[in-house]
Image (cartoon, rainbow, N blue to C red):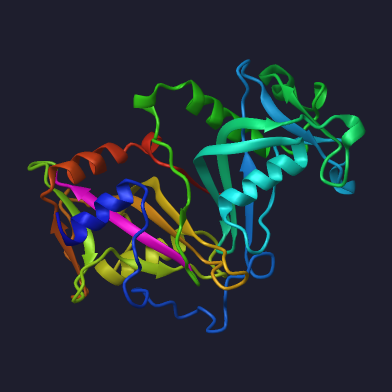
Amino acid sequence: MEGLELELSFLLEGKSVAVVGEYDTKRPNLRDDFVPLIKRTVCYIVCGVIFNEAGEVLMMQEAKASCYGKWYLPAGRMEPDETIVEAVKREVLEETGLEFEPDTLLAIQISTGIWYRYIFTGQITGGTLKTKDKGDKESLQAKWCSMNDINMGKHGSVPLRGNDILPLIKMANDYRTESLSERHRHNLPVINAHRQLVLRLVIIHTEVHTGALFVLRRTDSNPHLPTCVISPSDPSIFTALNLVLQDAFGKCENLVRKVAGVLTVEHSGKPQYKNDGICLTLLVDLKTENEVFPSTTNDQYTCSRLENEDVIRDLSLRMNTKFNVKLVSLH
């Protein structure tokens, strides 16, 4: 296995892949001086959705004046010089008193080009549950809550700070109760340094009549998957996706069947303020009117037929969204 198929196999296994040269699709509206900096120019939020053996969810009671006394999942903003995993472990410990070991990313929520929330689930490995007498500026207390209490919302014993966490709790509950063969494998962020917000795209298409699987690639001296910088002014990540489609095919309308999910998240965060960028690898299933891969209008792109049976089988499986980390655009 060589070249593009080797790159795909690494990504499907949740490993990092180097970005080749400069990013492919240029952003005419991207400020030359924009640099992702944690808590300055980008906002990365982490959240833990954690269940105990009784099926109860770990919740914390807010100490902030704006939502004092309300309940929420343990969550908060990443700090400089942190990895994404370090951040979620710290937030859970600070707000609940419990030590958390994440198993996997469940989803990434994106509001704009510079706002990302990483949703994890996993196991409690130690610590002591924070009680009222241990309350501090991080939280008043923490407790395990039944699904019934949570679903009752403002009428129950755990009035929520916001209903936005209800879909996250359902997602995590579905994940933990599904069999291993019916959910995505454990997938955690990979440590890899990036100085920009980068979108790497695995754009695929299966021919109906032949069953052949094709993938869009760059035709540079070192063929690779297309990349694009996510602009801070983008209303959603789909802006960058559409730019790549326009660059390759001259259009983007009526091309995308579905975004199947995120294959990898790459981030370093170290040293402080040097590598606060990310790289998201997105799997996209392409639709065309005649069910064949459209011809590229840019000679820097081509559509390559895959031959490796393991890569083809894994990609075909991952077209089902339940086998990938979910991408949720809030716009």
Image quadrant for the N terminus? bottom left
Residue drawn 76% across and 36% down? 97
Query: Looking at the picture, how far across and down is residue 26, in whole percent?
Result: 39, 77
Question: Is 10 part of what is drawn in magenta?
Answer: no
Using the rendered image of the protein, determine whether residue 330 is visible from the camera's viewpoint: no
Q: Is residue 28 left or right of residue 95?
A: left
Q: Of 65 and 128, which appears nearest the observer?
A: 128
- For the stretch drawn in magenta, the main secondary structure is strand
- Residue farthest along the left direction in this orientation: 210
- Residue farthest along the bottom direction in this orientation: 32
Q: Which residues are magenta?
A: 197-207
Q: Is residue 46 left or right of residue 206?
A: right
Query: Looking at the picture, how far across and down is residue 248, in whole percent?
Result: 26, 69
Task: Look at the picture and state if 49 lies above or below 6.
Answer: above
Q: Which quadrant would residue 318 be assigned to in this image?
A: top left
Q: Of 159 and 281, which appears nearest the observer?
A: 281
